[in-house]
Amino acid sequence: MACKTLVLLDKDCLNNIGGVKSPLLYNDDDQITGETVDGLTGQITGFTSVVSTFLAFNFKKNAVSLAVSKKTDLNEGSNIHEVTLTVSLKRREQVKRQVLEAMGDGQRMLAFSVLDGNGIYWLLRNMQLATQEEANGATKAEGSKYDITFVGEMDDAPRTMDALAVAELLV
């Protein structure tokens, strides 16, 4: 027996733009509590508490991708949403390495605010630094880079946030 009612999904005529815009905002996951969610839209409109300001993670154009995959275990009757945030940072530097190592220190849980190419903010919770690869190109033109992957498992798909909720992360 299904738990939710099926509803009509109309075709929209909006332009669909990929990519993620800079900057990503991040902090330890436990720095935000009590999401206030609009009962009609499901969008986050605020938080009970933001303990400390989120930090900016700046990157160049076309360097970040976000994927969400719903995983269902038919035998156990469980569903999770696996979230993968991939970042490519150009030019290897000591400062970048130190920031990345702090982000992965102790397998810490992170939260990210992500602005996609369509101008929609998404909140990603329970994210952890899963891989950090460093490479130098074979030629001068290839340069050097970090390829970083953050992964997380969420009970529900990531929620969108309105501009006021995003502003609370920056106070």
Image (tube, grey):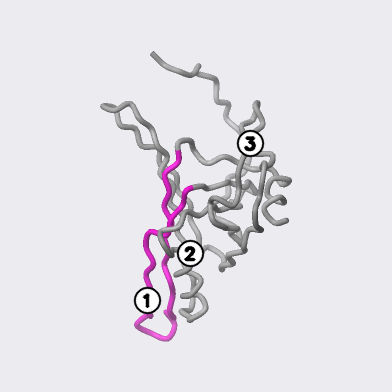
**Nearest to the observer: residue 146 or residue 39:** 39
State yes or no: residue 130 in magenta: yes
What amino acid is at disc 2?
Answer: Met
Mark 3–mark 1 CB contact (< 8 Å): no
For the residues marked 3 and 1, what is the alpha-carbon distance in whole angstroms?
Answer: 39 Å
Q: Residues within 10 Å of mark 1 (few under 14, many from 20)?
A: some
- Amino acid identity at mark 1: Ala
* Image quadrant occupied by the C terminus: bottom right
Q: Which residues are magenta?
A: 126-154
Q: Earlier in the sequence, mark 2 or mark 3?
A: 3
Residue at the image point whose x is 61% and y is 52% from the top: 115
The Cα–Cα distance between marks 2 and 1, rounded to whole angstroms, is 19 Å
Distance from Cα at disc 2 to Cα at disc 3? 27 Å
Is residue 52 found inside the magenta-colored segment of the image? Answer: no
Crowding at mark 2 (Cα within 10 Å: few <14, some 14-19, many 20+) = some
Magenta stretch secondary structure, dominant: strand
Q: Secondary structure at mark 1?
A: strand
